[in-house]
Amino acid sequence: MTQKNSASTFAKGLKVLSCFETGRRDLTMAEVSRLTGFDRATTRRLCLTLEDSGYLQKEDRAFRLTPKILAMAGGYLTANDFGRSVQPVLNQFAEAFEGEIALAMRDGDRAIYIARSATSSARISFGFSIGSTLPLLPTAVGQMLLARGLASDVDLDLARLIPEKLTEATDMDLTSIRQKIERAASQGYAFVRNEFEMGAAGIAVPVGNIGASPAVLATTASINQFDKAAEFDRALDILRRAAMNLRL
Amino acid sequence: MTQKNSASTFAKGLKVLSCFETGRRDLTMAEVSRLTGFDRATTRRLCLTLEDSGYLQKEDRAFRLTPKILAMAGGYLTANDFGRSVQPVLNQFAEAFEGEIALAMRDGDRAIYIARSATSSARISFGFSIGSTLPLLPTAVGQMLLARGLASDVDLDLARLIPEKLTEATDMDLTSIRQKIERAASQGYAFVRNEFEMGAAGIAVPVGNIGASPAVLATTASINQFDKAAEFDRALDILRRAAMNLRL
DNA sequence: CAGAATGTGTGCGATAATCGCACTTTATGT
DNA sequence: ACATAAAGTGCGATTATCGCACACATTCTG
């Protein structure tokens, strides 16, 4: 059905492209067709258009993203001047942590890393990088982003977002989650352990806005690194000082 | 004109999207129309489709990329497992340098950073990050990538690529550039000073392939950091050891 | 402040692009 | 060798798209 002010073929194509967002290594046209629900002939034309345009390359019968998509991401980062204004600050404070620090914001129903720095002693595990996406409910980053919203928006979000049991410790109770978000708002930080990844803990603090969108600063580490109150306090202090140093 | 196996509306839309790759902060529909050559009504529909799909947001009358494009980049990085296999090694060797180290590959007629690490003491200047693109001819990264190609491909490339005078010192002579590429191939590293950015020097070494595409590892610094032969040799040695440590 | 320049929004007829179906061919798996 | 899955193809029907011209809105300039 034709919709004013829109190009449905283009929208379909973007949906095909978004199939590659999850990090699935190789996708055949048949798989893309199943994921999108589009007719196989339609999917074929759209995939080949992405290949012609340089965003996908085909190997055997499977497609994968090319690094051209990184250039687009680079366009976003350059437009915001993050390479100069944000990255050096994150590098400095990652060293203060001897760990990892990341700047994140919300994109739809998820959190997304938009800048990150880590030292060689940082915990590897999940393999976070620019562009990594995290769920909102079971992560410190997500809870702090939700906490930065209006209470009425939190109500709407909690009515829509479905908790997903990622570990044995993932909190599936919306009332409990809401309390954590409210506590994050009142105490100025979110702290989550074992809910997103077993053995991992995260702390997130508010940091200002990117455009009109709230951003948060976070660090993740092994849970035992924050066991002692002094270690936790030190990490929180460094995060807060990093937040004050960031010019967003 | 209809072309088999393709969707021209989608291709047009991707061309609109690519207008935002350059890091231009805000683009109006009129500007996008001029850049692409498309009719203004066509451009309007395509821009609004990108907005509907979450890739662009509009502020006043200008559009800008949203962080959603970073998630796509994250899909590329996750598919290649760079967050786990590459980033920790780069972090380790950035510390050895007390500077910057980056993994790059070729994308069309440019080099593109696909992973990067820097310490707080690294030189800021250009603000490189994942997704940063560099020209092939006046950069160590570019010359090393060209050097990794077949001699016949280098011939074709040098016949097509047009040198661009970025600094007073940019080499515009194709014969001279060809010699530098050949030297890079024979000595196993490329070294460039002041040609891309005044005051900046870069060293690049080969590092293996990503998929079927050659990759290189590079560091950049102030030119005076490599003035002494001992400093240069140390940097080259660290780069080579980093290259050996990377599992691509 | 008026006029010029630029950007945006809209309607609509023509037509080109797209769709999706069914069939064929190729590749892979058992 | 056969079954299954994926890809490739042709084509008629239909829809989506295009681009033009005009109107409206915003910004710039003298």
Image (cartoon, coloured by chain):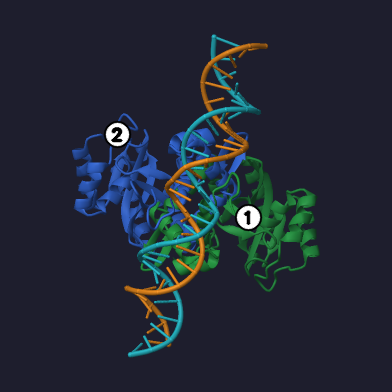
Chain colours: A green, B blue, C orange, D cyan
Frontmost of labels 2 and 1 is 1
Q: Amino acid at mark 1?
A: Ala
Which one is in front, A47 or D8? D8
Q: Is residue B186 left or right of residue C16?
A: left
Q: Amino acid at mark 2?
A: Thr
State whether residue A114 is above or below residue A124: above
Do marks 2 and 1 share a subunit?
A: no
Q: Chain of mark 1?
A: A
Which one is in front, A9 or B234? A9
Q: Position of residue B241 (x, y in %)?
A: 35, 58
Indicate the secondary structure of the residue bearing disc 1: strand
State whether residue D28 is above or below residue B177: above
Which one is in front, A141 or A75? A75
* Label 2: few (<14), some (14–19) or many (≥20) C-alpha neighbours in 10 Å: many
Write the residue at 54% across / 66% down.
Answer: A35
* Label 1: few (<14), some (14–19) or many (≥20) C-alpha neighbours in 10 Å: many
Residue labelled with disc 2? B170
State whether residue A131 is above or below residue D18: below
**Looking at the rendering, in which quadrant would you find the N terminus of chain A?**
bottom right
Q: Is residue C23 left or right of residue B188?
A: right
Q: Position of residue A118 (x, y in %)?
A: 53, 54
Write the residue at 63% across / 70% down.
Answer: A198
Q: Position of residue A236 (x, y in %)?
A: 68, 52
Asked if the residue at tag 1 contacts the one at tag 2, i.e. Cβ–Cβ closer than 8 Å, the answer is: no
* Residue A111 numbered tag: 1
* Residue B76 numbered tag: none
Indicate the secondary structure of the residue bearing disc 2: loop
